[in-house]
Image (cartoon, rainbow, N blue to C red):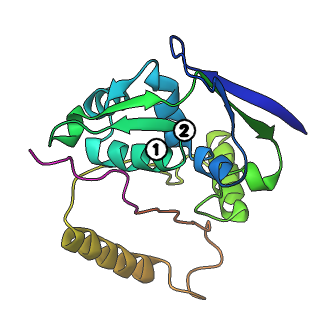
Amino acid sequence: MTGWRELTFPGVTRKESVIVIDGERLKLLADPLRWRILTTLGEGKSVAEISSMLGITDTRILRHLERLAESSVVHLRKSGSDPRTWRCLPAVGKIRFPNRSDKAATPSHPMSTEVVCQFNQAFRETSDGIFGPNSQSSVNHNRARLSEDQAAEFNRRLLNLIEEYFPPGKGDPSRIKYGFFGVLTPIDLAPIKS
């Protein structure tokens, strides 16, 4: 099913008042962070203001704004040498794009659908007590600023631990089967240096 979604920027008066987003620009706006940036933009904000509102480093915000500017969805006014003070302004008063429910418009998961389903099912069953009172289950969400070397060392040590506890084809078949689902991925860039 295809309908239309619109985002209006109040107070913006341009000769071209509406941009219809399709093709490559549609892929550009499928990124959830770029959509969040656009929804906070209003009549225009600096890189630092958007960064502060979303709790994301100014470097990362700037990279997404540059992509949006390349596609003419916004204007990036570069004044001065400090990119944090550069202003992002909507290119038009309204953008309109198809709200498609097909796979092409859906961002892909970093994990397969099967793995995601197993993960969700396991947590539902754990909360229902299906594995008994002594089963182990944990979810951790940790964030830290690491160097590339530190991230590589963490990954190496984690993989060694996984190999030790989850060796293929080994284990006691009379015990509860455990699965480990982990994702180590960058979630933000270093801030712009003064």
Q: CA–CA distance between discs 2 and 1?
A: 6 Å
- Using a 10 Å C-alpha cutoff, classify the residue at mark 2 as few (fewer than 14 neighbours), some (14 to 19) or many (20 or more): many
Question: Could you tell me what secondary structure mostly forms the magenta stretch?
Answer: loop
Name the residue type under label 1: Ala
Name the residue type under label 2: Val
The image quarter containing residue 98 is top right
**Residue 140 shows in this picture:** no
In the picture provided, is 171 more to the left or to the right than 51?
right
16 and 69: which is toward the camera? 16
- Using a 10 Å C-alpha cutoff, classify the residue at mark 1 as few (fewer than 14 neighbours), some (14 to 19) or many (20 or more): some
Residue 149 place in picture, x, y as percent:
20, 74
- CB under 8 Å between callouts 2 and 1? yes
In the picture provided, is 145 more to the left or to the right than 17?
left
In the picture provided, is 70 more to the left or to the right than 62?
right
Residue 3 place in picture, x, y as percent:
85, 32
Whether the magenta-drawn stretch holds residue 188 is answered as yes
Question: Which residue is found at the position 65% from the left and 58% from the top?
Answer: 108
Q: Which residues are magenta?
A: 185-194
The image quarter containing residue 9 is top right
Residue 133 place in picture, x, y as percent:
56, 46
State which quarter of the image contains the C terminus. top left
92 and 163: which is toward the camera? 92
Whether the magenta-drawn stretch holds residue 105 is answered as no
Q: Which type of secondary structure does the marked residue at label 2 adopt? A: loop
150 and 19: which is toward the camera? 19
Reading the image, the residue beneath label 2 is: 73
Reading the image, the residue beneath label 1 is: 69
The relative height of residue 42 versus residue 191 in the rendered view (above or below) is above
20 and 117: which is toward the camera? 20
